[in-house]
Image (cartoon, rainbow, N blue to C red):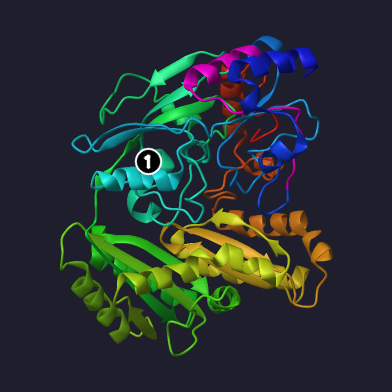
Amino acid sequence: MLDEQLIDRFVQVVGAKYALQTPDQQTPYLTEWRDKYQGVTKLVLLPSCVDEVAEIVRLANETATPLVPQGGNTGLVGGQLPDLSGEQVVVSLKRLNQKRSISPVSQSMIVEAGVTLLEAQEYARDHERLFPLSLASEGSCQIGGNLSTNAGGIQVLKYGMMRDLVLGLEVVLPSGEIWHGLSDLRKDNTGYDLKALFLGAEGTLGIITAACLKLFPLPVERQVAFVGCQSLEQMADLFKHVSEQAGASLCAFEMLSQRGLDFSLQFLTKQGRAAEPPLKQAWPWYGLIELESTQQGIVEPLLETVLEGVFSKQIIGDAVLSSSQAQRQSLWTLREVMSEAQKPQGGSIKHDVSVPIAQIPAFIKQADAVVEKMIPGARPVPFGHFGDGNIHYNVSQPKAADKDDFLSNWEKLNEAVYEVVLNHNGSISAEHGIGLMKRDLLARVKDPVAIDLMKTVKKALDPKGIMNPGKVL
């Protein structure tokens, strides 16, 4: 039990100032932005260094006290919050925010878990290098959380998921030992790839305190096109042609629907921000394509040539190219506010899924039919990373519906949509993780041998079950 005596021992590790015990202090660490999950705790700890994290974990291991590691609290599946027992201690990594070193020659940097993604991007940019992970929450999400959830984002198509951007890790194990694995070697073929255990583990196997991350040459030229298509089949054909002709210059290929675009425009207008349809005519589907290059004068003529080709083949109906950095950002804004733009429309039931790219049209068509049958008048708003198969298949409530009544269908609708996903050889979680939301479902859809292997790893590393219990497994 987390009694006063044990609380005092934890407090001594970080000092009273960084041990939060009152409700007003704890609130930001116990709720998430969608208000779907809330937690309860007697103690939130804010360690400042890896040694303090290790001391906290050693004490937790000694007393079998469950810990919940937390980054920027931007997660969408409840993995970063404690349960309602009040017996789990939240360990926020926000004070581990040092940018330890950077090597433009080795194209790597070492940053601590509490560094925000935006700070990491700027640190790289200050040294004329690119850290390519890009998320809508990059101003508040933290590197530790990005690693623990294997975050994706808009440039997975070219640079891969977060696990593809890691060279080494520093991790506090459930025993309280520190694994010093911050190597920047590109080749190290000396046994098991231990860092892979902790990437995407959502804090259930240890606490990541720092990482050595890959960097890339800084692009000097970017060009964006916003295109309209009559069908998703045309969108798939467009992706095929663009990826073939643009090659390594293609860094993003996003998709949104007319309904999604309308939501974004309405949202931005209500905020008093300039917002106009990019194309003169409305189209059922829109693609947002970005090319980049480390050389000047490459991507604009390349993108023009690609679009001329697909236009002549009647794959697209219209297109606009960004003529300035401001216009490029305004086009991206239409896509980036998609999640926020759904809030004023009432309740929204979310699905972060992936299917093979060729299956996206059939998946969305079948999922739409399932939604209409279950909740007539509900408004699907599929959008996301078409180029890597990750679709955020969100469903907004019917216009006249009661929000609470609509949201009561969350689990039932999830299961129906996930069945369609699995029928298309997809995944129920593309980039948000499992957390609490999809934990029970994972056990039903994952290969039983894979589940057994995961449980074996969990038991071997965390025999007392103190690391983020109740999440993932």
Q: Residue at x 64, y 44 (%)?
A: 445
The image quadrant of residue 463 is top right
239 sits left or right of 53 in the view: left
290 sits left or right of 171 in the view: left
Residue 60 visible in this rendered orientation of the protein: no
The image quadrant of residue 41 is top right
Looking at this view, is 18 or 174 the one in front?
18
222 relative to 83, above or below: below
User: Seen from this angle, which residue lies furthest top?
Assistant: 62
Residue 217 location (% of width, % of height) = 22, 48
Residue 254 location (% of width, % of height) = 43, 66
In the rendered structure, does residue 57 fall within the stretch colored magenta?
A: yes
User: Which quadrant is home to the N terminus?
Assistant: top right
6 sits left or right of 61 in the view: right
The residue segment tinted magenta is: 37-59
User: Which quadrant is home to the C terminus?
Assistant: top right
Mark 1: amino acid: Asp
Q: Residue at x 67, y 44 (%)?
A: 438
Residue 21 visible in this rendered orientation of the protein: yes
The image quadrant of residue 212 is top left
Residue 201 location (% of width, % of height) = 54, 33
In the rendered structure, does residue 50 fall within the stretch colored magenta?
A: yes
Q: Which residue is mark 1?
A: 164
